[in-house]
Image: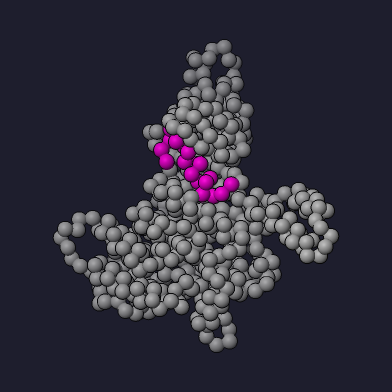
Amino acid sequence: MPFNIFIQKIFILISLWLCSVTAYAAKSCILTALNSIIEPQHDSAVELELGTELPSHPPTFLKLLTTTNNKLDGLLQNGETLPAWLLKWASNKFPHITKATELNWDDLTPEMQIMLLREISKQRKQNFLIDRQIHGIVARKKVKLIFTKPTIFMGNEYKPGAHEVDVSKFLGNVEYSGLNAVENVIGVELHFRANKPAGELSNDAWVLLKGLGIPRNHQHIHIVAPLPVEWLRAEPELRAAIIADFFRRANLAAEAITIVQDGNSIKTREGPDGIRYFGSLMPYILSNVTRYFLNIGRGVILNKHDGYVKIAWVGMRGHDTYDSPNLWGTEFRSISRRSDPALVKNVLNALQYAMVRNEFGVPKEQMEAWIKSRSTGSITDVPRLLGDAWYNKDWVQLWDKTPNHPELAFNKLKKSGENHTELKMLIHDWSKDPLFFNDPVIQKMIAIEQNRALTRLNETDPKITDLDTHINTIMRDFLLDSGIYEKVLRSLGVKLEK
């Protein structure tokens, strides 16, 4: 959320008036006053996707929703009409009501509410890519939450039992959950937003669902921060590399958590229409992200959707997405229902801390040295260098350039990698990585573990009946034993237990 500039200015004036007139004391007092108000805002939003076809969902999550006026006519926004089955039911159930549109939304059962939403959505023929909102449907201002033990939710303590909780400040628009959900409404998406640390908000979103009796679901969470325009302009190439590499490491950390903690693979997912809606970050996308920040630093006029990254474990949004053009954000897209809430909280808070303070985890001197070590001639192409540092390249390109791996049938590795993009980590040259390039000890350890993992992968063992689990075990061991998991997460400020 944008800072309240007016209040900040008033606070500064009052603080300066109270300061001493002596030069040293005045300087100290001014700095104290400024530091007290520029403590970063914590603007975070969780996307809650809830499926209407899951048995436990319709009778529960619909308690969060109503129409704009709590009546059926509030759903009818653009000439839509109620279906015949509903009119017949209404005339039998409520003979005293002359118009079915006057019925309350809550007069319908949850199953009927879903059926009606589907009927109205079909009439609208809405283009999801242009407009995702379910018009006429809003989040309730208050909901009934049931807690089985003492619970803290959004900063308030609740005793065991039922509580009517005001959620009007946290829940925003109600949207279709995806392209295929517009007509059949197989899912809805609610935005749960607050000015609080991202990790806490993520955990609170799960508390909300638990209070409604809904099983924990996966999350996408947006972390928003001021776009560091002046910071980038001071040293465009260097600082664009620093912030883009932070984005790269955030993706690497998210993927590593998926493998190590959640036991899942890094797999590209496509819809029935062939549209790619989830997958690992691509090198050219990372180059584009670097170029985006470089253009900001150089004062280049930005185009609409510059800085937009959707297909990645951690996405990104640029200057034209949020409340004002001076904001940017990351979208952590890989929090699963199996994720550890404590680790999720730790990671999200660390990313937010870095973003709002422009402290991205790799020292300036280290990034300068990395750029120098990777540059050839007098021209430095920082976007290309960052893209080349990412592991998810074409298989043939990786194989041709990878040192120190044992003889292994390339086709077998590539075949296994169709559902396990993470296997590319085993033939990636990690000496190009800005975090590892100047650390020969960890480079040697990574090479040793790459060889060990590839050898294990090539072994034929009749006891292996689940190849996916076998690959996950190999990759988990590789990330932990090589030191990549720990060093990447610590570079982002994540506190890990020893």
Q: Which secondary structure is most common in the magenta stretch?
A: helix
Taking depth in this image into account, of 43 and 131 the one nearest to the observer is 43
- State the extent of the magenta-drawn residues as a range: 196-216
Residue visible at 84% across and 60% down in the picture: 21
Name above or below for residue 483 compared with residue 130.
below
Q: Quadrant of residue 402?
A: bottom left
- Is 45 left or right of 432, judged from the image as shown? right
Residue occupying the far bottom of the picture: 377
Taking depth in this image into account, of 179 and 190 the one nearest to the observer is 190
**Placement of the C terminus among the 4 image quadrants:** bottom left
The x, y position of residue 387, in whole percent, is 49, 72
Residue visible at 56% across and 60% down in the picture: 354
Residue visible at 53% across and 41% down in the picture: 190
Name above or below for residue 201 compared with residue 35.
above
Taking depth in this image into account, of 379 and 78 the one nearest to the observer is 379
Name above or below for residue 114 compared with residue 358.
above
Let me know if residue 198 is in the magenta part: yes
The x, y position of residue 379, in whole percent, is 58, 84
Let me know if residue 244 is in the magenta part: no
Residue occupying the far top of the picture: 96
